[in-house]
Amino acid sequence: MNADTPTLPPRARLTPQRQVVIDAIAQLDGGFTLIELYDRARTLEPRLGLATVYRTVELLRRSGAVRPLLSQGRAQYVRCRPGHHHHLVCLSCGSVQEADVCAAPPDEEVKRLYGFAPEGHELDIYGTCAKCAAA
Ligand SMILES: [Zn+2]
Ligand SMILES: [Zn+2]
Ligand SMILES: [Zn+2]
């Protein structure tokens, strides 16, 4: 297993069916919906149920290996590496790139202005990727 393979939370059991879902995610590029993942996973294991896909994605979401994308009212997910980063989502080809730049206000500033103690934030940036811009 390389560092790029999505992993389940520590106490979740890795069943053969869940492994199929993980393999399917590893094959997908960019964002995906549950149905797209289900279709892909069933090419690997035709007897796979949608409930298994759903539950596995839930587990991977808890471990941070996939993250929901807050895009255009479409319930999409994206594979994710650990560590702080944000996603650059291309609106024309759907590719998702991870970016280390962060534009969120510093915790201290949020605390000073609003008396609010931040623990995290999510930010997806939408636009046109370099490949699409060049086309
Ligand atoms: Zn990510
Ligand atoms: Zn693009
Ligand atoms: Zn950030």
Image (cartoon, grey):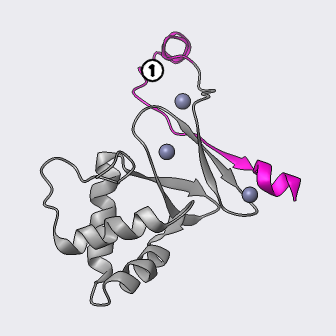
Where residue 49 appears, as percent x and y from the top left, is 28, 84
Residue 86 appears in the rendering = yes
Q: Residues within 10 Å of mark 1 (few under 14, many from 20)?
A: few
Please name the residue that numbered disc 1 is placed on: 116
For this rendering, which residue is in front, 75 or 96? 96
For this rendering, which residue is in front, 51 or 115? 51
Magenta stretch contains residue 29: no
Residue 128 appears in the rendering = no
Kind of residue sitting beneath label 1: Phe
Q: Quadrant of residue 53?
A: bottom left
Determine whether the beta carbon of the residue marked 1 sits less than 8 angstroms from the nearest atom of ligand 3: no
**Residue shown at 52%/67% (left/top)?**
32
- The residue positioned farthest toward the bottom in the image shown: 46
The quarter of the picture where the C terminus appears is bottom right
Where residue 9 appears, as percent x and y from the top left, is 21, 49
**Residue shown at 52%/35% (left/top)?**
85
In the picture shown, does residue 98 fall above or below 79?
above
Where residue 96 appears, as percent x and y from the top left, is 61, 53
Magenta stretch contains residue 134: yes
Q: Which residues are magenta?
A: 106-135
Where residue 10 appears, as percent x and y from the top left, is 16, 47
Left or right: 38 with respect to 98?
left
For this rendering, which residue is in front, 22 or 115? 22
